[in-house]
Image: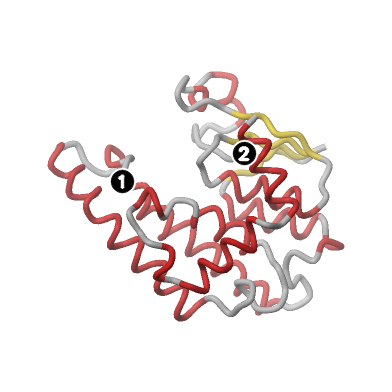
């Protein structure tokens, strides 16, 4: 039994959806950021980073979304969530997810996590003002150079798709029009129609 710790509106959604897509036997526990549960002693004992997601396995705890997605794909190979038999193709999957983690997510975080990088209020305003530009540029690059279609990596649905879908949820709040990237807009709609995605989204509303 796997256990996922998550919070609504976060990148943990990608792992949550992937577990459901894989048909994994798992439970999900929601943390309240409003109540600062991510920094509670109990949770810090699980993930000292004080972030979500965290995935508890029978071998220990995993953190960082790309690592968790790769673990799920490899643990449930029958779900065919990654090209596990081709080292280069699997590296391409990892490359895409690493870009989402290391660049796209960080650009988004500048909107409300400025204290991670600065102390002056004027700096926070500057960082927040840049978010529509940087997020728009990231998604334009994905649309034009990285997205193969109809899924991220081509004909096969992979662990890249729930991750992209998760970050696409942030675009409206970042003042980026998803319609400016029509392939990603179409991807967002098709992802939203998947049974696993609908189940997870409904669970988060409960």
Does residue 200 lie above or below 192 as drawn? above
Horizontal and vertical percent for residue 33? 47, 27
Colour treatment of the image = secondary structure
Give the side of residue 25 with respect to residue 99, left or right.
right
Determine whether the residue tagged by mark 1 lies in a helix, strand or loop: loop
**Placement of the N terminus among the 4 image quadrants:** top right
Does residue 20 lie above or below 177 as drawn? above
Taking the spot 44% from the left edge, 51% from the top edge, the residue there is: 170
Q: In which quadrant of the rendered view does residue 125 lie?
A: top left
Camera-side residue of 135 and 83: 135
Taking the spot 76% from the left edge, 34% from the top edge, the residue there is: 27
Give the side of residue 142 with respect to residue 111, left or right.
right
* Structural crowding at the residue carrying mark 1, measured as other residues with C-alpha within 10 Å and reported as few (<14), some (14–19) or many (≥20): some
Camera-side residue of 29 and 47: 29
Horizontal and vertical percent for residue 30? 62, 29
Q: Residue furthest right?
A: 78
Horizontal and vertical percent for residue 46? 62, 29
Determine whether the residue tagged by mark 2 lies in a helix, strand or loop: strand
Q: Which dot, 1 or 2, sits closer to the camera?
A: 1
**Placement of the C terminus among the 4 image quadrants:** top right
Q: Are marks 1 and 2 in contact (CB under 8 Å)?
A: no
Please tell me which of labels 1 and 2 falls first in the chain. Answer: 2
Give the side of residue 168 with respect to residue 174, left or right.
right
Mark 1–mark 2 Cα distance, whole angstroms, equals 23 Å
* Structural crowding at the residue carrying mark 2, measured as other residues with C-alpha within 10 Å and reported as few (<14), some (14–19) or many (≥20): many
Q: What mark, if any, has residue 111 been given in the picture?
A: 1
Q: In which quadrant of the rendered view does residue 141 lie?
A: bottom left
Does residue 168 lie above or below 54 as drawn? below
Q: What mark, if any, has residue 54 been given in the picture?
A: 2
């Amino acid at each position: 039994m796997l256990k996922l710790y998550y919070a609504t509106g976060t990148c943990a959604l990608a792992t949550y959806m992937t577990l459901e897509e894989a048909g994994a036997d798992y439970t999900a526990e929601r943390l309240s950021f409003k109540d600062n549960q991510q920094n509670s002693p109990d949770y810090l004992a699980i993930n000292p980073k004080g972030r979500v997601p965290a995935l508890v396995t029978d071998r220990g705890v995993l953190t960082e979304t790309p690592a968790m997605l790769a673990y799920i794909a490899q643990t449930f190979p029958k779900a065919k969530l990654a090209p596990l038999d081709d080292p280069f193709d699997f590296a391409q999957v990892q490359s895409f997810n690493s870009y989402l983690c290391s660049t796209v997510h960080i650009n988004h975080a500048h909107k409300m996590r400025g204290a991670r990088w600065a102390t002056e209020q004027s700096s926070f305003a500057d960082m927040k003002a840049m978010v529509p530009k940087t997020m728009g540029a990231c998604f334009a690059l994905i649309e034009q150079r990285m997205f193969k279609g109809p899924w991220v990596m081509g004909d096969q649905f992979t662990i890249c798709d729930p991750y992209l879908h998760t970050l696409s949820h942030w675009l409206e709040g970042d003042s980026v029009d998803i319609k400016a990237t029509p392939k990603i807009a179409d991807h967002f709609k098709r992802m939203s129609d998947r049974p696993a995605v609908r189940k997870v989204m409904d669970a988060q509303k409960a």
